[in-house]
Amino acid sequence: MVAQLLGLAFLLLPTGLVTFTTYAVQINHNGEVVYQDTSVYGVVGKAVILECGTTLPDMYLWSFTKPGTEAIKAVVYDLGRGPRIQTLAETLGRLTVISKSAAVSIEKLPLAAQGLFTCQAFYDIELEPKVYYYYVHLTVRVPVSKPYLLMSDASPVEGSTMWMRCNLENGTGPIQYMWQHETRSGNISTLAQGNTSVINVTDVNRNHTGWYHCVASNAVNSESSNRLWLDTIFGPDIPQIDVTPYSMTERGYSALERETVSLLCQAQSNPASQYVWFYNNSQVYTGPQFIITKILRMHTGDYACLAQNTYLNTRSKKTISLTVYYPPDGSPSCSVQPALNHSSLRLLCSWPGGFPSASLQWTGVLKQFGQDEADTWQQTNPLTNTALLLPSEGLTSNNSLFTCMGSHPAIKQSKECSTRTYVPPAEPVCFAYVTNNKQYLVLSCSWDGGAPKALVWWEGPGGQGKGGEENSNILILRYGTAHSGKPYTCHAKHPLLVQAKTCRLTLEVPVLLTQRRVVSVYEGSDVQLTCNLRANYLPVSEITWFNNQGLDVQDTSKYTLLRTSAWANLTVRDTDETQDSGEYKCTSFNAVGGTEINVTLVVKRHPMPPNATLIKVMYNSRQRNEVELEWQVHSEDQGGWTGFILEHRYVSERPGRRGSSNDSKEGREERIGPPVWYRNIIQDPEVRSHTVGRLTPTVTYQFRITPINHRTIGHPSASKTPAEPRYNMYPAVIGAAIGGMLFAAIITVLLLVYIIRNRNNNPRESCRQTPAS
């Protein structure tokens, strides 16, 4: 019975694989076989249970048909004595029969287990058997393996085309692919998804840079690949230059002098850009940030940043203009000037230098006007003008202060300057002078002080002048063309005065004066001749003296000149009657004319001194080497002498006398030669005696006295020979003396005879002066 049933079971197996998913046949109780189809999905390596009805049949048989074949092979069966697993089951995984059921469990499911499993179940075989056919279609699915990502170009250039592929080793389809992009900042987005493993990027841009991975999914599982970096090569873009501190102007950027300025260059590029800085087309720095410490005005110019992509060998450049602001030196300067022919005032304020130009503004201007004048003036005159025109008649005071405020972006505090307007305190001053080459006479006029300066001009006789023109404070006349005795008028006009002021010059020929027209002086003295210029107006070039010979006097040992612009004194030294007496002339001239004055110098000789007589001429000892002299002057009451000339000369010599043995023959002949008077000057007019020493005892001398009055020499007295001194001795001595005197007398007579005979050979020298021997 069992065999029959089994045979029937095999006969009823279909010859082809059932491909439908579920098909059930209602069991008829008329003996028909019941068919039931199910589909089961398993995963490779996992476990799956194949059901065979809901209850345990009396007998069952599991068979397997491999896809693409028609063979039905038994896997396991149970004929009521327990399950019997066939050898084929080993190729289908680890197959076991679940207890108390006909279901089988397959562990570590291989891909070879995919196919049609058929379970033939027999129920109620002792009665009327019922047969069930369970068709279990087992589909073994392979999970997707870990995918890996491939890129046609991991570093594409921006704008190019590239593809990415998600590769799988295993996986049962259908498989879905999802592409994810992770940016540098960590943001993840889905780039694409679908059933294709390849995506194409036709226009790569820098936004595609980042991490990429793909997720492969099927009915079993989902796997994600490792991240792969896509590095888009691009740039450099046009650089962006950031300037710190940030200060924009119409021309570019600005910085204050001595600030620290930072120039930061950034250009989008991959790989990162390399930066080179240029200043006025000259390379100055390499790197993204160029810092200028304490920038100076000389650093003003164009700064260019060159960004380079060395990978692509591309570059881009941007240039900015940097202007260094620096303040002007010092402070503003203010001044006030006349305007509109000295009827108005012009205020000037300047502060040159610096960049940009300083801003200047006048303050305090409206305070100098009355209310009505201020309102009228302000309507047409903004105070920001550096040059303001003020009507002088509206000013409330002739001593007004105006202040100009100067500001500059390079300095924190404003600076100011002030100027005043006031009338000169004194009166105009006129003067004249002659040029060095004596070609022109210059009349000059000044009115010093005051602000602004006054306008001056000259008016002279004959239309000479520049009536009211500016810069005419001098009047130039050719030398000799000036009018004598006629006034030249200087007019001075100040903006704060209604009427002009004047000063006058009247030019005259010089007039010379002297203290004495005739000067008398004794010979030998110094005399001063004076020449003064009268206080008339016009400068003279020089006062000149001419001597009695008509020659121009210069400083010499004879003449001394003392000069000023107003006088010149001539001193004649050591006057002489014959040389210095005569007419002396003092001359002077100016641009109008010349003049002269004569001074007569009379040099007189001193009067003749009175005569003098020797009253005593005597040796004062027996040695005969000193002689005492006394004299008297005739008419002493009248005076008139300044000293005396005491003279002596050799007359004769007595041979053999004591003291003569030491003298040579030549010495004696010299002493007794032609008589020469030797002078001894006595400058004291009160002296009446004198002693002459150092005489030769053997020589006979003669003495005489002559009075002198300065340079006038009187008549010499009669000459006398010294007498012997008087002694009180014994008669023998007296006798010897008498004998000696007689002998001397004889010698004297002989000497006189000799002198008389030879006097023509020994001329007298009466004025020679030598010291006594």
Image (spheres, rainbow, N blue to C red):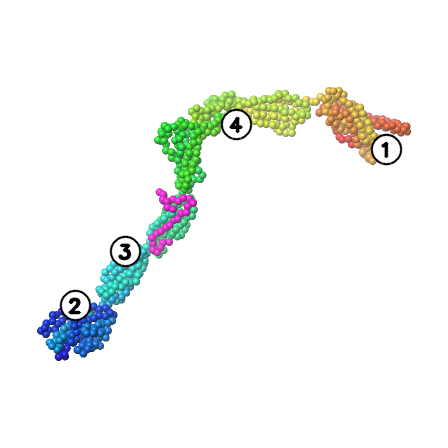
Amino acid under disc 1: Gly
Quarter of the C terminus within the rendering? top right
Of residues 678 and 44, the one nearer the viewer is 44
Quarter of the N terminus within the rendering? bottom left
Q: Secondary structure at mark 4?
A: strand
Separation of residues labelled 1 and 4 (CA atoms): 88 Å
Name the residue rendered at 50%, 23% in the picture. 505
Measured as percent of width and height from the top left, residue 292 is found at: 41, 48
Name the residue rendered at 12%, 72% in the picture. 34
Task: Say whether disc 4 or disc 3 marks the residue closer to the N-terminus.
Answer: 3
Residue 21 badge? 2
Separation of residues labelled 3 and 1 (CA atoms): 162 Å
Q: Secondary structure at mark 3?
A: loop
- The stretch in magenta equals 245-274
Of residues 228 and 476, the one nearer the viewer is 228
Task: Say whether disc 3 or disc 1 marks the residue closer to the N-terminus.
Answer: 3
Amino acid under disc 4: Val
Of residues 270 and 47, the one nearer the viewer is 47
Q: Which residue is mark 3?
A: 203
Please say if the residues under marks 4 and 3 sit with CB atoms less than 8 Å apart.
no
Task: Say whether disc 2 or disc 1 marks the residue closer to the N-terminus.
Answer: 2
Q: Work out which residue is located at the far left of the displayed protein and give it.
A: 30
